[in-house]
Image (spheres, rainbow, N blue to C red):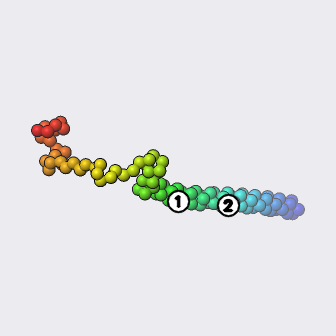
Amino acid sequence: MARVNFLLLAVLVACAIGMIAAQHHARRAFIALEGEQAIAKKLAEEYTQLQIEQGTWGTHKRVESVASKALGMKLPDAASTTVITLPASSVDGRTSSGDGRKP
């Protein structure tokens, strides 16, 4: 009977150690999961900020501002602008020969 009690005690201790190890492993995995979720949240915020920044950099007002300040470009005045009108038949770009020359 003492052997059975000793065997049951050994099994009980082994199960307790296994349970403690499993809980420890689960806690470590949960801590790692929370860390990764925090990193994912930061990356999502950064991505949103980058999308906003990309939209800002691409606006016409921004491009015009950089062109005028950094490159010294300006819009031409009306006196130096010439408007050229094309005949109605060549507006769509089609020609009868198909090689780009006029018929």
Could you tell me which residue is drawn at 14 percent across and 50 percent down? 88
Residue at the limit of the structure toward the right, as seen here = 2
Q: Is residue 70 left or right of residue 11?
A: left
Could you tell me which residue is drawn at 42 percent across and 53 percent down? 64
Q: State if disc 1 and disc 2 touch (CB < 8 Å).
A: no
Q: Position of residue 42 (x, y in %)?
A: 60, 59
- Which badge, 2 or 1, is on the more N-terminal residue? 2
Q: Position of residue 55 (x, y in %)?
A: 46, 57
Report the Cα–Cα distance between label 2 and label 1.
Answer: 27 Å
Q: Is residue 82 above or below residue 6?
A: above
* Quarter-of-image position of residue 31: bottom right
- Checking the image for residue 59, the label placed there is none
* Three-letter residue code for mark 1: Thr
- Checking the image for residue 48, the label placed there is 1
Q: Is residue 73 left or right of residue 13?
A: left
* Three-letter residue code for mark 2: Phe
Could you tell me which residue is drawn at 29 percent across and 49 percent down? 80
Q: Is residue 71 above or below residue 7?
A: above
Report the front residue among 97 and 68.
Answer: 68
Q: Is residue 16 visible in the rendered structure shown here?
A: yes
Q: Is residue 98 left or right of residue 71?
A: left
Quadrant of the drawing holding the C terminus:
top left
Report the front residue among 44 and 53.
Answer: 53
Report the front residue among 73 and 50.
Answer: 73
Could you tell me which residue is drawn at 56 percent across and 57 percent down? 46
List the residue tagged with mark 2: 30
Q: Position of residue 67 (x, y in %)?
A: 44, 49
Q: Is residue 11 visible in the rendered structure shown here?
A: no
Closer to the camera: disc 2 or disc 1?
A: 1
**Residue neighbourhood size for the residue with mark 2, other residues' Cα within 10 Å, grouped as few (<14), some (14–19), many (≥20):** few
Q: Position of residue 97 (x, y in %)?
A: 13, 37
Q: Helix, strand, or loop for circle 2?
A: helix
